[in-house]
Amino acid sequence: MVLLLISLVARVHEVAFRCISQRLLVLTLALAGGFAFPGVCVHAQGAGGDVAQQSPSSRPNILFIMADDHACNAISAYGGRLAKVAPTPNIDRLAREGMRLDRCYVTNSICTPSRAVILSGQHSHTNTVRTLVDAFPGPDSQTPNVAEILRQSGYATVLFGKWHLRSQPWGFDYWKVAPGQGFYYNPVFVSSTDKTPYTSRVRRDAVRSKGYYTDLVTDAALAWLKQHDRDQPFFMMLHHKAPHGKWEPAPRHKRYLADVTIPEPESLWEDFSHRSPATREMGTSITSRLAPRRTMVADVQKADWPAGSIDLRGLTRRQQGRAAYQKYLHDYLGCVKAVDENVGRVLDYLDSSGLADDTLVIYTSDQGMFLGEHDYFDKRWIYEECFRMPFLIRLPGTVPAGATNATHLCSNLDFAQTFLDFAGVTHEDVARMQGRSLRGIVSGKPPEQWRDAVYYRYWMHLAHHYIPGHYGVRDARYKLAFFYGLPLDASLGKGQFGPSTPGWELYDLQEDPQELNNVYEDPRYAPVVQRLKRRLLQLKQQYGDEDEKYPELMQVRRAHWD
């Protein structure tokens, strides 16, 4: 008994000393002008529900690195026309030392909704964040927050970089984020230790940090890692602004690829006659095809274009389109270069500090991005280039090195449950999540039963880039999309835009991976159309996305469903 008491007293003194030492380190960093963080002696709480967890020794750190608008086509591990031109060696390390998922899809290809899905494990219509102006529900709501669940289970939870969810970040022991979209150069950051409340708009009296956004958020993340108590597992969300537009490469990358002609995608000069009338003349273009609507040709000639304008006067329309494409890709890939360098900084620190073997690392983007394919330069559509997300994952000893999964249909809907599964955490909020853990898949032991299709819905009818409201389904081979063309009650679009022409599109992705041949009207595909329409309705019912609450949508469905 005496020995037991001595052991307990020693353990208490050890924990107390560690906490005091931690605070002294934080104070030292603050006095040195570095980054200061709150104390990290965080213990499991149950305020948001009952939490069950594994022993600390079996709980890996989780480092979730997310870029913004980073297309698979701009990551050399995924191959494609840009792989040799603009390699990403540091991001590629995760593919070489872990697994690459080739069929990971976003539920709603726009920044704010995708981030809400990742945190909540719920579709946009369920978590209520359907557009760019919807705020993520707070801690008093019924919306799950995977960061809060992990915090309650004993993880140190931190967020650095782009938040873009309008409401104040919650679920994190410490956060340091940019209001709204943030600036590439000398950005403003706000943190959980600031005395002023968070706002999604930049305050007039805000202090700007000197430097480049991608470098600065990585600096902050590394500073936190260096002072963190290793006895406590961490969950870090490291969110880059890049390569979101408007694109401004770091000074060191202003001339990156300056003497290189970037290969064009075949579909830059697509013949849109195969498209449904619902999409044929919609969107915004690289070339002047959709002028006077927004085009890259017009953007890059503006005097205030952030990365410098170019003069296209005197060129033919085709020459202008080609020049605008080159300017866009050079600026975009310059931003990617800084992301890749900073991913390398973080991976190098994990190696040198001995954390690599115990840290699950994921690299992804909030959605994909058009890099000239279909003459587009944004996202939002259900087409593969922006529908598909990169997903690279590494955990030595668990995730097989150099592996690729090109079979299973995965989604950002699955990320929250994947984090919790690796952390060994069960929680009552998981019952309200709508995805599935990817742990079996990325460990090379996929479950026998897995989803046969993924559901997609874009709500922001005609807002910003003139893309109609639509939903659809993708299975292993085919994609069916219904462009219903109504604003409904979504925050952006309602009251601003009227209806657009409804229509359907079907793509055979095995025969037509670039989606250059809409076969919806082809009688040979009639059985596929009927099967996918049934599957689409089943998924809508499964996820509770009910068209019946919108009489105007039901009217369009009745007129165009068959």
Image: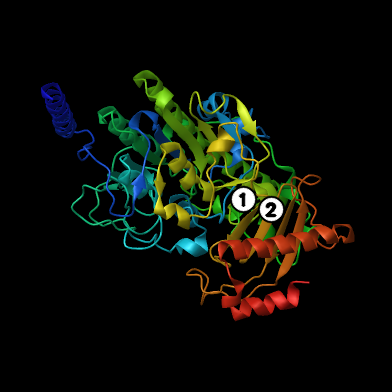
Q: Establish if 414 lies above or below 129.
A: above
Amino acid type assigned to the residue bearing label 2 in the image = Arg
Counting from the top left corner in percent of width and height, residue 165 is at 40, 56
The quadrant of the rendering that contains the C terminus is bottom right
- The residue that mark 1 highlights is 387
- At horizontal 37% and vertical 40% (from top left) the residue drawn is 53
Counting from the top left corner in percent of width and height, residue 505 is at 75, 61
Q: Is residue 513 left or right of residue 229?
A: right
Amino acid type assigned to the residue bearing label 1 in the image = Phe
Residue 11 occupies quadrant:
top left
Front residue of 465 and 54 = 54
C-alpha distance separating marks 2 and 1: 10 Å
In this orientation, does residue 434 appear?
yes
- The residue that mark 2 highlights is 474
- At horizontal 78% and vertical 44% (from top left) the residue drawn is 510
Front residue of 152 and 319 = 152
In this orientation, does residue 164 appear?
no
Which structural element holds mark 1? helix
Please tell me how crowded label 1 is: few (under 14), some (14-19), or many (20+) other residues with Cα within 10 Å: many
Pointer 2 or 1: first along the chain:
1
- At horizontal 75% and vertical 67% (from top left) the residue drawn is 277
